[in-house]
Image (spheres, rainbow, N blue to C red):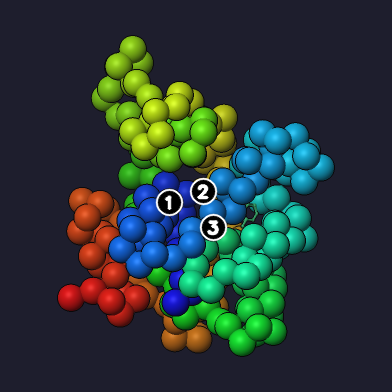
Amino acid sequence: MNLVLLGPPGSGKGTQAECLVQKLGLAHLASGDLLRSAVAAGNELGQRAESYIKQGVLVPDEVVIGLILEALEGKGGFILDGFPRTLEQAQAVEQALAQCNQAIDRVVYISAAEDELVKRLSSRWTCKQCQAPHNMQGVPSDLRGKCSRCGEELYQRADDQPETIRKRLEVYLTQTVPLIDHYRRSSKLAEVNGVGEVAQITQAVLQAVGVGR
Ligand code: AMP
């Protein structure tokens, strides 16, 4: 099964992708994680992407499409998280998959209200090593500790600051929301409410992809 998780920044795509990996054994490809790793490595692609990420705008299609298609090579059964984010990206991945007799089987759109997204993003700390997100709402700075998954240090992403959060939400509305209709037209879309207990949302996502009770 090949899945896409679609939704605004902060809707919980990464968290749900990790839960689905555990349950379904699919490969998890997060475009944001791949881009940040390239920036940290200081390679050519990372250098091209860095200023876009900092500003909270989309990295040019040709850069991200190349990165994702390369990461997808040889993978059967995956979850795309944060990609596609434009119609051009959606068409590029559909074409590439068709060439190897594969397709996107289901697109799960995880929704949440804007004030909830801003609250989550501004209290999110991310692992420097494995990029796992941690919700630090109400946790004093001296008690923030280390990554619950790999034990490495946590940091607050520069694009999780209020100004950049607003920009990212605006970019989502103008450039990514049209994908909802694109996938609705092909009857691949299922919508899940992204507010609530993580485990309950995972159940709803599993049901949406046809493997839940
Ligand atoms: P994310 O970790 O998904 O919130 O992505 C962080 C940043 O990486 C975004 O604000 C964009 O600058 C960039 N990015 C991630 N995925 C994509 C994509 N599919 N297309 C363009 N830019 C992306």
Quarter of the image for residue 172 reads: bottom right
Vertical position of residue 42 compared to residue 94: above or below = above
Vertical position of residue 54 compared to residue 59: above or below = above
Query: Residue at left 38%, top 59%?
Result: 21
According to the image, label 1 marks what residue?
14
Say whether residue 173 is left or right of residue 13.
right
Q: Secondary structure at mark 3?
A: strand
Which x, y percent locates residue 58? Answer: 66, 51
Query: Could you classify mark 2 by the number of other residues whose Cα lies within 10 Å: few (under 14), some (14-19), or many (20 or more)?
Result: some
Q: Quadrant of the N terminus?
A: bottom left
Answer whether residue 124 is visible to the viewer in this image: no
According to the image, label 3 marks what residue?
29
- Tell which tag, 3 or 2, sits nearer the viewer: 3
According to the image, label 2 marks what residue?
169
**Distance from the alpha carbon under mark 2 to that under mark 1:** 17 Å
Say whether residue 119 is left or right of residue 155.
left
Quarter of the image for residue 192 reads: bottom left
Query: Could you classify mark 3 by the number of other residues whose Cα lies within 10 Å: few (under 14), some (14-19), or many (20 or more)?
Result: many
Which residue occupies the foreground of this view, 20 or 150?
150
Which x, y percent locates residue 76? Answer: 53, 73
Which x, y percent locates residue 72? Answer: 62, 66
Mark earlier in primary sequence (2, 1): 1
**Distance from the alpha carbon under mark 3 to that under mark 1:** 10 Å
- Tell which tag, 3 or 1, sits nearer the viewer: 3
Identity of the amino acid at label 3? Leu
Query: Could you classify mark 1 by the number of other residues whose Cα lies within 10 Å: few (under 14), some (14-19), or many (20 or more)?
Result: many
Query: Residue at left 38%, top 24%?
Result: 146
Identity of the amino acid at label 2? Leu
Answer whether residue 175 is visible to the viewer in this image: yes
Say whether residue 55 is left or right of residue 24.
right
